[in-house]
Amino acid sequence: MNKQNLWFITLLSIILILSIYYISIPSNTILEYTNTPNNDVTEVISESTNLVALRVSDDEEVLNTIQELQTTLLDKDTTIEEKNLAYESLKNINETQGKEEEIEKILKDEFNYESFVKIKQDQINIVISSTTHDKTIANKIITRIQSLFEDKKYITIKFQ
């Protein structure tokens, strides 16, 4: 694998991640500020502020990890094995983000909940923006999400 191919793969993965992120952002997450005649600023937030904060924090963490892996890929002093591990890690990050977005879409389409999903190895943490804490709905969500995977996952749901 030469340097030009490595750059191409790296840039392609960055573009893929950013395009998936851009497409998956719901249009109702935009903050609106309006000035009233009394010069009071009114803030309208359509999606839960907690979910937005979780997404921003997670995106920063993922971008830092991607930058570290890309540095490893482009470093002349790293071994081929280390570069292969870095490449596999980048590929796993892309796959994990795709699964997280798929789960969020299922929760939105089938259960009508705005959510944040974080997958780490065999654990799936889901934060749902809802004032009602229904155990039967949580069990249905867990069953539905588990059906997406062949192996056992530990799924936690938190209502906020």
Image (spheres, rainbow, N blue to C red):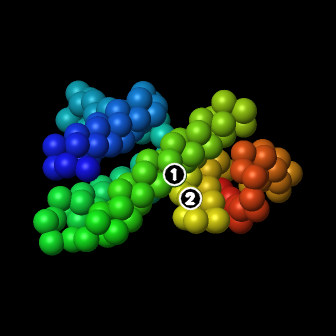
Which disc, if any, is residue 96?
1
Which callout, 2 or 1, points to the residue nearer the camera? 1
Q: Nearer the viewer, residue 133 or 99?
A: 99
Left or right of 122, for residue 22: left
Which disc, if any, is residue 119?
2
Q: Label 2 sits on what residue type?
A: Ile
Percent across and percent down for residue 73 are 24, 60
Q: Nearer the viewer, residue 44 or 36?
A: 44
Instruction: Evaluate whether residue 66 shows in this view.
Output: yes
Q: Label 1 sits on what residue type?
A: Thr
Pointer 1: residues within 10 angstroms few (<14), some, or many (20+)? some
Left or right of 82, for residue 152: right
Percent across and percent down for residue 58 are 40, 58
Q: Is residue 80 above or below residue 94?
A: below
Left or right of 26, for residue 141: right
Which image quadrant: the C terminus? bottom right
Q: CA distance from mark 2 to mark 1?
A: 7 Å
Q: Nearer the viewer, residue 40 or 49?
A: 49
Left or right of 77, for residue 108: right
Instruction: Evaluate whether residue 11 shows in this view.
Output: no
Q: Marks 2 and 1: CB-CB under 8 Å?
A: yes
Percent across and percent down for residue 41 are 26, 39
Locate residue 60: give its quadrant: bottom left
Q: In the image, what residue occupies the spot 71% across and 65% down? A: 154
First-in-chain label (2 vs 1): 1
Q: Nearer the viewer, residue 6 or 57?
A: 6
